[in-house]
């Protein structure tokens, strides 16, 4: 199979630099956690050739600019979920249905994804999510109302929740 092009670029935000990549089918990833050469190697391993920018990335960066400017951005950019497990994709769709500025529990998200007893699995899907903040995993919290974990970047989750409530 010949390699496919993957648009690749960066976006600077108040919480750090994001790296974005997308195929013709939609965004492949948005992340703050990776170094660009590691991301490029990961894309190459999946059969992609990185090309600079493009219309998909321009639209995604416009969405992110609106979000970080405090606007409620319109429709989220398309996501290329071809390599995402079906359960994770259902969890991401459920998270994307959480209203701007609102929160839902991991159990609520699992139930909305069709697996009401899979709160921990929903948390695992959120931890693997490569589409933050388009998939608003920061809006998913513990059932007791605590914001829960977010790896080493708990301050980012707090910042985003405050940003959306402002």
Image (cartoon, helix red, strand yellow):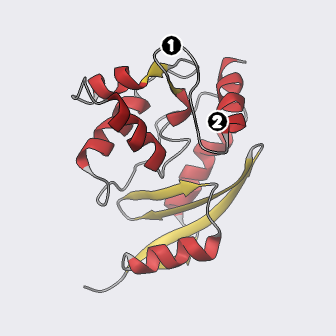
Residue in the image at 29% along x and 24% along y:
112
Residue found at the far right of this picture: 14
> Viewed as shown, does residue 110 lie left or right of 75?
left
Q: In which quarter of the image is the N terminus?
A: bottom left
* Mark whose residue sits in front, 1 or 2: 1
Where in the figure is residue 91, as x and y percent of width and height? Answer: 34, 36
Q: Nearer the viewer, residue 98 or 51?
A: 98
Q: Quadrant of residue 28?
A: bottom left
Which mark is on residue 100?
A: none
Q: Which of 112 and 123 is in front in this view?
A: 123
> Viewed as shown, does residue 134 lie left or right of 69?
left
Residue in the image at 36% along x and 79% along y:
47
Residue in the image at 49% along x and 49% along y:
131
Q: Is residue 147 above or below residue 7?
A: above
Q: In this view, does 34 lie above or below 150?
A: below
Q: Nearer the viewer, residue 32 or 79?
A: 32
Residue in the image at 31% along x and 60% along y:
83
Label 2: state its secondary structure: helix
Where in the figure is residue 142, as x and y percent of width and height? Answer: 49, 21
- Quote the CA–CA distance across marks 1 and 2: 27 Å
Label 1: state its secondary structure: loop
Where in the figure is residue 165, as x and y percent of width and height? Answer: 67, 18
Residue found at the far top of this picture: 144
Q: In this view, does 124 lie above or below 28?
A: above
| Mark toward the start of the polypeptide (1 vs 2) | 2
Which residue in the structure is indicated by mark 2?
67
Q: Do the residues labelled 1 and 2 touch (CB within 8 Å)?
A: no
Graded by Cα atoms within 10 Å as few (under 14), some (14 to 19) or many (20 or more), the crowding at tag 2 reads: some
Q: In this view, does 70 lie above or below 41?
A: above
Graded by Cα atoms within 10 Å as few (under 14), some (14 to 19) or many (20 or more), the crowding at tag 1 reads: few
Which residue in the structure is indicated by mark 1?
144
């Amino acid at each position: 199979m010949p390699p496919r092009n993957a648009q690749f670029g960066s976006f600077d935000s108040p919480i750090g630099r994001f790296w974005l990549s997308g195929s013709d089918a939609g965004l492949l990833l948005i992340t703050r956690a990776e170094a660009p050469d590691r991301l490029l190697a990961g894309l190459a391993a999946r059969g992609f050739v990185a090309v600079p920018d493009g219309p998909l990335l321009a639209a995604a960066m416009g969405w992110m600019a609106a979000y970080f400017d405090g606007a409620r951005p319109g429709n989220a950019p398309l996501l290329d979920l071809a390599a995402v497990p079906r359960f994770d994709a259902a969890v991401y769709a459920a998270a994307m249905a959480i209203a701007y500025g609102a929160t839902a529990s991991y159990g609520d998200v699992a139930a909305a994804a069709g697996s009401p007893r899979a709160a921990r699995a929903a948390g695992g899907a959120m931890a693997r999510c490569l589409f933050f903040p388009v998939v608003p995993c920061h809006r998913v919290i513990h059932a007791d109302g605590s914001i829960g974990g977010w790896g080493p970047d708990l301050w980012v989750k707090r910042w985003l929740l405050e940003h959306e409530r402002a």
